[in-house]
Image: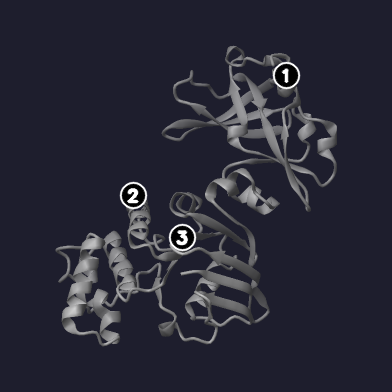
């Protein structure tokens, strides 16, 4: 399916929930709608499903405008964050519900349900009721039920929000593999950056009802197109006077220019660890946070408090310790544009060896 959305707009009373949103989705892609709460993600999803009507704009599925089509005629599967399973029905009957409504013959229903039970790892649970299942199993039933009528588009509204962290991690991998096997175009809402980055082919950042940026997780992380995206994705530090950091120029600190410095742009350690010591400056370790595979280090450099990572294989730092710090680059932006600034002293030193 090719999905196209043109200039979608929606008000709820005086609240402008969705503002002139346009995008395309390629067939078979898994798209993550990511953004803060109240940003408009679920409103977009509900309009695609036909559960809400846009004030203006067009929703086009494989060349057909569907604004006026009711939900049951849009060939859409919807998975809600609270599962929305029928408590009085078994797993089998929950999955079969949509097929029964379509008045399929019983042998065909049984064959389709059995296929989905195998696909979603629910074999052996067909005769259990929702209260006899774990959260992860109930969500798998919800996925199977949504897929049963063979929809052309699958919509998921924070599908893992009600599941504990360990099972949520397992279901992310399972969902990615399931979508690839089925080949269905899918859009899911989430406020979890890790979830969107891990699962989605592309991410759409929604904020204040507007589409801030659409692209692969890598592109959005490395080349954010707006100040909001730059500050929203990943851990980072916003600096207003980047020229106070060694290697950066005064013209990069004009009023209205801000610098975003990601942890991987910063290196912290002992003097012996730096080949270009002249491009570093002194700092003091403020806090250390163990992150399993690495340390998250908060270091004070002059008036700036910066965040970076340090490998567990290197000598462990201590709070209050004096260290050397190199800021390799900064992402600069104002209200109109953004660009990358490299540490000039590092670049000058490198050029001497070329």
**Dot 1: element:** helix
Distance between the alpha carbons at the discs numbered 3 and 2: 26 Å
Q: Earlier in the sequence, mark 3 or mark 2?
A: 3
Q: Is residue 38 visible?
A: no
Q: Earlier in the sequence, mark 3 or mark 1?
A: 3
> Which residue corresponds to the image point at 68% horizontal and 51% vertical from the top-left?
225
Please name the residue that numbered disc 3 is placed on. 29
* Residue 159: image location, x then y, percent: 40, 63
Q: Quadrant of the C terminus?
A: top right
- Badge 2 density bin: few <14, some 14–19, many ≥20, Cα 10 Å: few
The residue at the far top in this view is 272
Distance between the alpha carbons at the discs numbered 3 and 1: 43 Å
> Which residue corresponds to the image point at 78% horizontal and 53% vertical from the top-left?
336
Q: Earlier in the sequence, mark 2 or mark 1?
A: 2
Please name the residue that numbered disc 2 is placed on. 166
* Colour setup of the view: one colour
Horizontal side of 278 relative to 95 (left or right) equals: right
- Badge 3 density bin: few <14, some 14–19, many ≥20, Cα 10 Å: some
């Amino acid at each position: 399916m090719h999905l196209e959305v043109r200039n979608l707009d929606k008000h709820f009373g005086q609240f402008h929930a969705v503002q002139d949103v346009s995008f395309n989705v390629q067939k078979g892609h898994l798209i993550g709608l990511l953004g803060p709460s109240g940003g408009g993600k679920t409103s977009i999803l509900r309009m695609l499903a036909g559960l809400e009507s846009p004030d203006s704009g067009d929703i086009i599925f494989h060349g057909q405008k569907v604004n006026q089509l009711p939900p049951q005629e849009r060939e859409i599967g919807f998975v809600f964050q609270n599962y929305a399973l029928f408590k009085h029905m078994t797993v089998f009957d929950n999955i079969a519900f949509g097929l029964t409504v379509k008045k399929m013959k019983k042998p065909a229903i049984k064959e389709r349900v059995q296929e989905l039970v195998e696909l979603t790892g629910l074999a052996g649970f067909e005769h259990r009721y929702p209260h006899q299942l774990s959260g992860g199993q109930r969500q798998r039933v919800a996925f199977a039920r949504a897929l049963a009528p063979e929809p052309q588009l699958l919509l998921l509204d924070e599908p893992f929000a009600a599941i504990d962290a360990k099972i949520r991690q397992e279901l992310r991998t399972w969902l990615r593999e399931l979508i690839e096997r089925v080949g269905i175009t899918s859009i899911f809402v989430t406020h979890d950056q890790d979830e969107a980055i891990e699962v989605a082919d592309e991410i759409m950042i929604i904020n204040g009802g507007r589409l801030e940026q659409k692209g692969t997780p890598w592109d959005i992380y490395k080349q954010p197109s707006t100040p909001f995206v730059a500050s929203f994705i990943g851990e980072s530090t916003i600096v207003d006077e980047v020229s106070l950091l060694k290697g950066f120029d005064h013209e990069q600190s004009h009023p209205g220019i801000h610098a975003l410095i990601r942890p991987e742009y910063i290196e912290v350690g002992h003097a012996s660890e730096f080949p270009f010591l002249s491009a570093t400056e002194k700092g003091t370790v403020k806090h250390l946070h163990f992150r399993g595979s690495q340390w998250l280090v908060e270091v004070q450099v002059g008036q700036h408090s910066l965040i970076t990572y340090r490998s567990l294989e290197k000598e462990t730092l201590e709070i209050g310790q004096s260290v050397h710090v190199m800021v390799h680059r900064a992402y600069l932006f104002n209200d109109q544009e953004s660009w990358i600034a490299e540490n000039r002293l590092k670049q000058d030193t490198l050029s001497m060896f070329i």
